[in-house]
Amino acid sequence: MNIARPATGFEIREPSHFAGYLAGFSNRWPRVQDHWSGIKARLKMTGHREGVAVDAPGERVFEALGSTNGRVPTIRVAYHVLGATLTFLAILVIEPID
């Protein structure tokens, strides 16, 4: 499926429970919120071609590798791209393998 990214990037829709889920990791991973913000900024511009296509057209999974030394976890996120909108579906914080 060919998807054209809007010039200013996709409109991001994030479920409200993501914030609470990520906050639960802030003691172990103090930079988790910054890491997540960086992932969102990246996917806003490149989400239509990042990650791996799964299941239905427009559904993708992206994994941002973390680092114990860098003090950031691995974050895996599933999302759907439709038109000018990128909608996050699920998120998982994973202990990185160094």
Image (tube, rainbow, N blue to C red):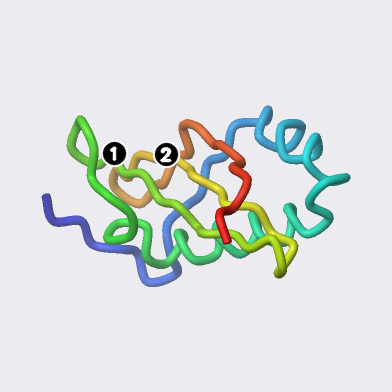
Give the x, y percent position of residue 39.
55, 59
Classed neighbour count for the residue bearing mark 2: other residues with Cα under 10 Å, few (<14), some (14–19), many (≥20): some
Q: In which quarter of the image is the C terminus?
A: bottom right
Spatial CA span between label 1 and label 2: 7 Å
Residue drawn at x 57%, y 52% is 74
Residue drawn at x 63%, y 63% is 67
Residue drawn at x 35%, y 52% is 84
In the image: residue 95, left or right of residue 84? right
Q: Which residue lies furthest to the right in this view?
A: 27
Q: Quadrant of residue 6 in the image?
A: bottom left
Give the x, y percent position of residue 69.
72, 68
The residue that disc 1 covers is 59
Q: Which residue lies furthest to the front in this view?
A: 98
Quick check: marks 1 and 2 in contact, CB under 8 Å?
yes
Give the x, y percent position of residue 44.
46, 60
**Secondary structure state at the residue bearing disc 1:** strand
The residue that disc 2 covers is 78
Residue drawn at x 64%, y 54% is 36
> Which residue type does callout 2 highlight?
Ala
Give the x, y percent position of residue 61.
36, 44
In the image: residue 90, left or right of residue 32? left
> Which residue type does callout 1 highlight?
Glu
